[in-house]
Image (tube, grey):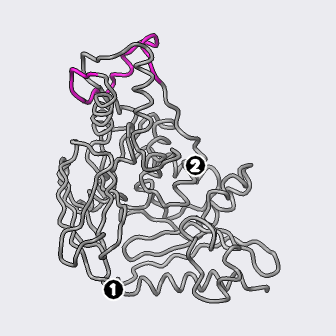
Amino acid sequence: RFQKDKQDVTAIMRDWADQLKAKGIRAISGNIVADDSYFDEVYFHPGWAPGERGEWYSAEVSALAFNDNCVDVSWSAKGKLPGSQAGYTLNPDTSYVDFTSQVDVAAKGRATERYYQRGADSNAITATGNLTVDTTNLDSAAVHDGALYAASVLREVLEKEGIKVGGRAVKGRGAAARLGASQLLLEHASPSLLTVCEIINLNSQNFYAECVSKALGREKAGQGSWEAGSHVIESFCKSAGIYSTGHDAVDGSGLAEKNRVTGRQLVDILRYMDTNGLKQQWRGTLPRGGERGSLKSRFQGSEKGRSVDSRIYGKTGLIGGVRSLSGILTDSRGREMYYSIILNQLPGKEASKGMELIDDLAIDLASSGR
């Protein structure tokens, strides 16, 4: 994600191989050991839908992760007839997954979508659905055991780059703590937390939000778990004077059905973030109407919307039966206001109408001058 070529997902690992070879290392006699003990071993939240384990938004949450714990799938229906099988390539091209495609080519004009399924402890991924004739698409499918995935792909990359590995890719929780500092060969620093928050807010990236939640639990409560992260979040809201009656942070992204939050709480959080010295930094992570993130194509349905869209900042929320938008907007007199609009229990066929209602309300607020 953070490389110049975002599809070159093994670039960092190839750089590691180059650094090892520069130190004279041409062979590794033992295993490639992955240590993900910074978080707990509950990788898939018990409140998430089991049938969606293979979908990118349900990616398992591990302290050691690679490519958002997904394998990318490039689809192509170029030069193919309706009813035939769509072509695909995997990135990375790894033996870690056993991929089966049941994706057909669909005629133009038909709605198309692809779905990914796998078992609880399996990396046998089956893709179903379709792809419109003469089009291409890029998806991601979630894998099982992100730490072992990272170690396995690293082993494959090292071999391809000329470093022979005698052992296997294995898990070894706590292995890093048993190594002395003198044995450190390579280090890789993550992007800043601010950059991570930009990905969460602009792209609605569940995996990053879940990692932040577990990291909060580890750093502030000594345990990298969903329970510890939720406790830290709820304690923070109370200590900061943020309205939290009825709040229940079951996970970090809101994917679990038992999560609860109120519009008043979200407005209080927005207000708090403007008063803690990080106003400009955090506002820069928010989607903006007609310009960036998940609001880039919103508010374009009317001339009225197009004239005010850039004055609407907001974080979207979307899950079965729920549509929401919370943020900051500026009205026609230049006054800023915090807002939160949440619609619950929307029937499936009414979800798009719910989105239209939210957009209309946001546009009316930004157009008002009272």
Q: Residues within 10 Å of mark 2 (few under 14, many from 20)?
A: few
The label shown at residue 303 is none
Q: Which residue was labeled with disc 2?
A: 236
Q: Residue 341 in the image: state x and y as whole percent.
A: 56, 76
Res 300 → quadrant:
bottom right
- Answer whether residue 173 is magenta in the image: yes
Seen in the image, is 77 located left or right of residue 294? left
Seen in the image, is 269 located left or right of residue 260? right
Q: Residue 139 in the image: state x and y as whole percent.
A: 35, 61
The residue at the point 50 percent across, 60 percent down is 203
The residue at the point 27 percent across, 42 percent down is 145
Question: N-terminal of the two: label 1 or label 2?
Answer: 1
The residue at the point 30 percent across, 56 percent down is 141
Q: Nearer the viewer, residue 78 or 196?
A: 78
The residue at the point 51 percent across, 73 percent down is 324
Q: CA distance from mark 1 to mark 2?
A: 50 Å
- Answer whether residue 116 is magenta in the image: no
Q: Nearer the viewer, residue 24 or 308?
A: 24
Q: Residues within 10 Å of mark 1 (few under 14, many from 20)?
A: few
Quadrant in which the C terminus is drawn: bottom right
**Vertical order, 113 against 196 (above or below):** below
Q: Which residue was labeled with disc 1?
A: 109
Seen in the image, is 174 located left or right of residue 304? left
Q: Nearer the viewer, residue 301 or 241?
A: 301
Q: Residue furthest front?
A: 79
Q: Nearer the viewer, mark 1 or mark 2?
A: 1
| Magenta segment | 164-186
